[in-house]
Amino acid sequence: MKFELMVALRFLKESKGQTLLILLGIIIGVSVQIFLSVLIGGLQEDLINSTVGDSPHIFISASENRPSSFINVEEDEILVSKITESRTLKNIISYNEILEELNEDSRFSAVSPVVNQQAFVTRGGVQSTVNVKGIEIDNGDKIYKIRPRLLAKEGELTGNNIYIGTGLSENTGLEINSILELRSSFGTSAFYKVSGIFDFENQQLNDALVFMNLPSAQSFFQMDGMISQIEMQIPKVFEAEPITRDLEKKFPGYKLVSWQENNQQLLTALNSQSSSSYVIQFFVILAITLGIASVLAINVVQKGKQIGILKAMGATGGMASRIFILQGALLGFVGSLFGVVFGIALLEGFLIGTRSPTGDDLFPLSIEPGILLFSVVIATSASIIAAAIPARKAALLDPIEVIRNG
Amino acid sequence: MVDNRETILQIRNLNKVFGEEVKTQVLFDLNLEIRKGEFMSLIGPSGSGKSTFLNILGALERPTSGEIIFEGKNINTLNDKDLARFRNQYLGYIFQFHYLFPEFTALENVLLPYLINHSAKTPEIIKKAENLLGMVELSGFEDRKINKLSGGQQQRVAIARSFINDPKIILADEPTGALDTSTSRAIMKLMREYNHESGTTFIIVTHDRNIAGSTERIVELVDGRISKDFSPKEIGEAQAWKEMERHACTDCDTLEK
């Protein structure tokens, strides 16, 4: 192998122009491939983060189809019997056990029990519907990042304090410390104090979301000892699906939904974006492969004499072919290493070029070593494959042809 | 005079036919015995089949039928890989065109046949290559690239290269064909000296009777058959000269073409 490597290196060194040209081709190809994959990856991550970063990734709620599971809950049988049919189905009754189990599970970065109900606010003769979310503020904050987004705050989310969005504030004229009356769909009503106004940079949420302390919500909506669902976040959003399926097995009788199931459209869009990026990357690699193949094919013809003489002097067909395989591998490996460096430079350049006036990056790009390694492996393998045909030619070359024809 | 040296190469009923559909036979039932340390020439006009014969002797080409027995072993039975190893170990080649590698220096070119089957350059082999370059009067040219050498120097590097693995037989195809008369003479002298020193067998293909005349045995090939096989020393220089009458002109080959 050492002999083949020596000859391969010498061949590459001797035809410097050719070697540099094809190296340049590989460098450009690999850097474009890395640039593209990291850019698309970053873009998608950014999009997903803004979509699900500050919202739950997995939801557990009572199964609508299998009310029997509630009836099985021990100690709460009396309670069950009291609850009207229609609401029984949708609420998790004995949630403490589930919560305990989930809190002990290290896969979750946040576990938050919530009560979700609709209520009405009447103000100046206009009635608006709001979505009340009863949360334990510390746990809910982990998911919704409420505190950092409060524009105004007068007290914690306790007792009769509620937080409303900027939209609702504008529409109804409610300000900080304003008192408002909430009415539930089944007729109960109570007064609450606006002790915080948040801006979620999302009109729908700003217009209709109202945060309330969990016990207050439970009592207002007559859901003592019950919650609507448990919301969870995990560190790696794309692991939501398998974890959800796992929880389904653990908690039969409950309905488990992952964020993916709620965002099918987004995922379809991302998938097709990925596919088109893969297609481009594939053709870039194909172009590199063809480039190397053609350069090496010319090389075999150019070095035909040398190969013939080497074989006359006792080099085997295997040795002759390895000389070209090695040339391909060397070109691919060295070229892709430089391509990686150049690709990173391109990405940095892109970030600097698209930076906002305040100096913020357009979106964060994470260059993972795995992607870089993958590019090097792919480019090197493609180069080796590209070298296969010239290598075969070299293996089959008959020294006699060379000697006879001078 | 009876030659009692051991036989190194024995050729038995050797035939070579080219072509699949249109068959052209170039060698007909050749029988020849070559002895260890012999310094012989193979002479013949263009198209006589002498180069083909040499290629078969050099294990570069396989005969259509017949046997080539090297030190008692039929090399026709070897597979391609073993044959390549055989060539590397036992044979040395000198071609009309030097066929050196322009990518390598003179010293590296000399080392190439060694490196094919050895993974490392030992100090001993480098010393040996340097000595060989010295022997062909190229000391000081070790690190020169091939295209920075004259035609005669290049051929001398090629000769040094053919010696590196201590081959048993050296096959030379028109080794002086591309060189002027005085350089040719020097090259022949060099090969003869090495033949004396090392006892290596030389088979030199030539169409030049001056070259053939300086060997100890001349085998003439005409139309694929051995027509003459004599020792110039035994029959006398004048007679030998006459025997080679048809190879009188040194440019015959080029003229015929």
Image: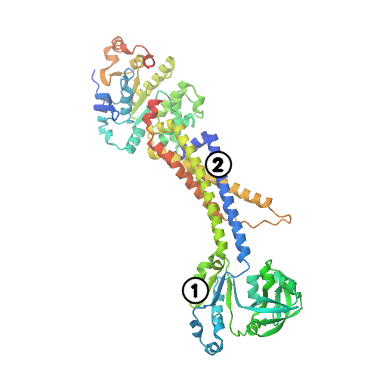
Tell which subunit mark 1 falls on.
A
Query: Which quarter of the rendered picture does the N terminus of chain A lie within?
Result: top left
Mark earlier in primary sequence (2, 1)? 2
Residue appearing at x 71%, y 73% in the figure: A168
Query: Which quarter of the rendered picture does the C terminus of chain A lie within?
Result: top left
Q: Position of residue B110 (x, y in %)?
A: 44, 30
Q: Is residue A9 visible?
A: yes
Give the distance between the C-alpha atoms of the residues marked 2 and 1, in whole angstroms.
51 Å
Give left or right: position of B147 versus A399: right
Q: Residues within 10 Å of mark 2 (few under 14, many from 20)?
A: many
Q: Amino acid at mark 1?
A: Glu
Tell which subunit mark 2 falls on.
A
Q: Are marks 2 and 1 in contact (CB under 8 Å)?
A: no
Q: Position of residue B196 (x, y in %)?
A: 35, 23
Name the foreground residue: A285 vs A366.
A285
Q: How is the image coloured?
A: rainbow
Locate residue B87: give its quadrant: top left
Q: Position of residue B112 (x, y in %)?
A: 43, 33
> Which residue matches tag 2?
A25
Q: Which numbered disc, 2 or 1, marks the residue closer to the eye? A: 1
- Circle 2 SS class: helix
Give left or right: position of B159 versus A152: left
Q: How many marks?
A: 2
Name the foreground residue: B243 vs B135.
B243
> Which residue matches tag 1?
A248
- Circle 1 SS class: helix
Give the vertical position of A349 relative to A132 (above or below). Answer: above
Give the vertical position of A384 relative to A162 (above or below). Answer: above
Q: Amino acid at mark 2?
A: Gly
Name the foreground residue: B49 vs A92.
A92
Residue appearing at x 53%, y 66% in the figure: A239
